[in-house]
Image: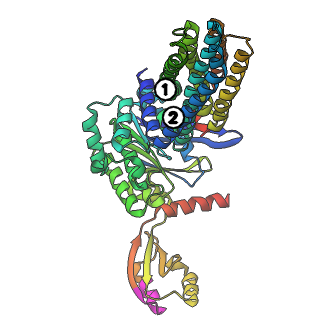
Amino acid sequence: MSAAIHIGNIKKSIGKREILRGIAFDVYPGDIFGYLGPNGAGKTTTIRIILGLLQADSGEVNVLGQDIRRADTRMKIGFALDPDGLYNNMTAFENLKFYADIYNAADIEKRIEKVAGLVGLADRLDDTVGSYSKGMRQRLSLARAMVHDPEVLILDEPTAGVDPTGQIEIRKILLDIARVEKKTVLLSSHNLDEVQRICNRIALIDQGEIKLYGKLADLRQKMGKSAIAVETKDVITEPVLEQLQAQKQIGFQGVKGSTLLFDSGEEAAEVSDIVGFLAGLGVKIERVGKREASLEDLYANILEEAEKK
Amino acid sequence: MSYVSLVMRSGVKTSFRMRSVVLVAIGVVFICVVGVAIIFATQFIGPGMKDANPDSSLLANYLGLILFTTSFMSIGIFASVIAFQSLVREKTRGNIQALLATPLTPADLWLGKTLAVFAPGFVFAVIMTIAVFIVINSIYFIPEIGVVLTPGMLVSSLVVVPLVYFALMLLVHEIGISARPVTANILAQLFLPVVITLMINLVTRNVINAGSWLFTVVLLGLALIIGVFVLVLRSKLTVEKIILSQ
């Protein structure tokens, strides 16, 4: 399958600062691709290069197999950037119509109604954007990205600065856009939880280098440790911890709050052995379950490895 | 061309929704124009009309100067205020970055934004200049010697002054979009008093007649000099330069 977005070994310096040091990844049609990284890692620079706003010093960038500098390629891309670039003293309808006119979209009024409905702003189209909350602006920004029915959506931190309820709404809209409208989505974020919830593939950038790239499920298997989590009723005491650390065969990983974590997998201890051992130590158990490796764990592993180097 | 017109129309629309800014600009222009017209008319035209045989060339000179300052101040103050507001606002809010991610080119954006500022200023300047022309002629000339009018004064105030300002607004937007709006604003703000003072001096010292074609040619030369700067700086107007200047 050919990539919808192809990034091949791009490098970019601004002034004397090396922002991107040869990054490469592909986004395939139908992906919701999470582009993760801490602030200042190079996410926005990458997005600007994909949108043709900055030019890579070297390397290859194409979208849908075409050079991004071509106007017909840009016609097939929708975007939401930060800052959003919406006109405060125009209404939401006027903002959407302005961009629909630029893209020469077909059947503009119907399309505006459709995308406004998709983002839940159909009844607020006549309000000036200056009166919108941050969450509403982000949703309008998504509607603007969709107004010309593009094949690819590029979204720079679409939930940044939005309250938790707004974030949930935006995540739901993004999933709808990908599934119902069948768009390829690349979204940048520094929110691990968000990416984990909606993306099927990710790339993690740190200090201008891709540290992790692939299907989220594969990456979890490859790098993250799943664990048996034992929630206890009481706070774990120091003597109990010492006993757990001394018993190597039980595979004690660590403690998070009142939850004890143990290795899982074929070579790990049986759950019944762990529970029996804890009961022997007088630990009162509330719940036992399996905890999947999260993106946060992967990220922590990577940072740990980087520190070791 | 359609992209330029789209950007221009949206620019005009957003500018005119900043009602307080537009009203202040119109108010300032109106006070300045009326003030200058009264001063010149009472200082130069009034005494000139008291002569037994009024010198029509001299009167045309003074009327030309009044029309020049009217047109220059109308378009200059109005365009500078609106340009600065729109450039600062659109840069900080990311409007320019968003537009450049569409099929629009930097040239479309530059011309569209310039026209959005220039067009209303031009219309305003034409209305003010014609109004001042009619008022001065009606009060001073028509009752005594008939209409005072030279083709040079009309071309200078209605065509060449707007041309000078169009060139200046191209330059201001070129700098404002690809570098810092504040630098562009300083240029726009300084240009008005410097050029007006220079031209008033040249005219009142009888170096040049404001009703003559020579005056028109001098203004055309000014437009050309600004045009050369616009062309030289044109290569700086790249997408990357614009984005990095935000």
Output the chain of dot 2: B
Q: Residue at x 38, y 81 (%)?
A: A287
Q: Position of residue A176 (x, y in %)?
A: 30, 50
Question: What residue is disc 1 on?
Answer: B124
- Tags 1 and 2 touching, CB below 8 Å: yes
**Towards the viewer: B5 or B66:** B66
Label disc, if present, on residue A22 of the rendered structure: none
Question: What residue is disc 2 on?
Answer: B26
Q: Residue at x 61, y 38 (%)?
A: B244
**Towards the viewer: B15 or A84:** B15
Q: Is residue A283 magenta?
A: yes
Q: Quadrant of residue A245?
A: bottom right
Q: Residue at x 70, y 15 (%)?
A: B203
* B125 displayed left or right of B192: left
Q: Position of residue A197 (x, y in %)?
A: 39, 58
Magenta region, residue range: A274-285
